Amino acid sequence: MVAGGDKNTPAVVSLTAGGIAGGIEAFITYPFEFAKTRVQLRQKKGLPTPRNPFLVVSNIYKEEGLRALYKGCGALVFGSVGKDAVRFLFFDQIKEAFADPATGTLSPGNNLLAGMVTGVVASITAVTPTERIKTALIDDARTEKRFRSGIHATSVIWKEHGILGLYRGFAGTTLKQASATAFRLGTYNILKDYEKKKNISQNTAVNFANGSVAGIVTTLATQPFDVIKTRSQSSHGASTLEATKSVLLDYGVRGFWKGTTMRLGRTVLSGGILFTSYEAAVKIILPLYSGVKQVKNAELA
């Protein structure tokens, strides 16, 4: 089964619904993303790292205000609209290449493989540059404060490093996106296929629960890639190898799971919000699309 409906969902509907869902999810859950990124960036040695995401969010709000919690949010929302539009569109298309010709269904392994390919496409087209800007803004806000906005940060990074500067951390981001998309979309579709076999109705509560479970699985399986990506995309940037070494030197192997509870706080919500929003958007957009198509066909007849 596809991520958001049946295999006949038109590409433009998947693209639009995925973009809307991505933007909604990114904006609502951004404070958790901000807290997670702050924790993963280099801290002063000897200072304890908080694990409670609500405590981190609360402290930042008290000390720096609400605007601080949404520093870099615009870049993430913009990237999420593109990322999730691409993810849902290409997953709907790519999964057909891995489907059983006789039944049209995907095995659990092929579900993951289709998601992995989709993640690579999303990383190249949307995720890496927008994640780079978001992370640079968050890091800069606690240190030099030289970036005035996402557009200004993009301009400065472009002038200093060229287009490669915007793709800093590409390897780590792509590994994260490939594995995260595989686990998130794969898990969601495995659960959805199982429920259909058991005649469990697909409603908002079930969609949210499936998305939340997919988010938990994704976080635990892909956290090391997320930590490396964050270190690579700090305000001055670092290569994937340099980022990996810095995590090991600072915290040892356990450092690769820095910010896990923060990310869990976000992904449990984001998984539920993302898939619920997508399913709802498809239900609204599909009839509108079908109506417009019928009118055009009538005019051409």
Image: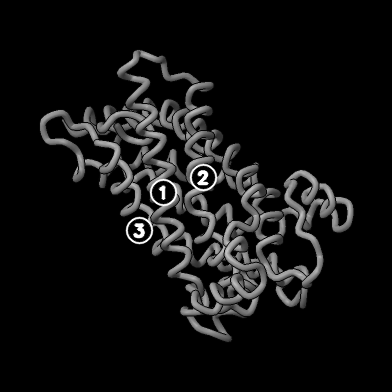
- The mark nearer the N terminus, 1 or 2, is 2
Q: Nearer the viewer, residue 51 or 13?
A: 51
Q: Position of residue 8 (x, y in %)?
A: 25, 31
Alpha-carbon span between mark 1 and mark 2: 13 Å
Percent position (x, y) of residue 232? 56, 72
| Label disc, if present, on residue 22 of the rendered structure | 2
For badge 1, the amino acid type reads Thr
* Closer to the camera in the image, 291 or 98: 98
> Which residue position holds label 1?
181
**Disc on res. 121:** 3
Sequence-wise, the earlier of marks 3 and 1 is: 3
Q: Quadrant of residue 38?
A: bottom right
Q: Residue furthest left?
A: 102
Disc on the earlier residue, 2 or 3? 2
Q: Secondary structure at mark 2?
A: helix
How far, Cα to Cα, is label 2 from label 3?
16 Å
Amino acid at pointer 3: Val
Per the image, label 1 sits on a secondary structure element best described as helix
Q: Position of residue 183 (x, y in %)?
A: 41, 45
Amino acid at the residue labelled 2: Gly
Q: Residues within 10 Å of mark 3 (few under 14, many from 20)?
A: many
Disc 2 vs disc 3: Cβ atoms closer than 8 Å?
Answer: no
Q: Considering only vertical position in the picture, is 299 above or below 205?
A: below
Residue at point 57%, 43% (across, down) = 267
| Depicted 142 relative to depicted 65: above or below | below
Drawn side of residue 251 relative to residue 143, left or right: left
Which residue is at 47% across, 63% downward? 173
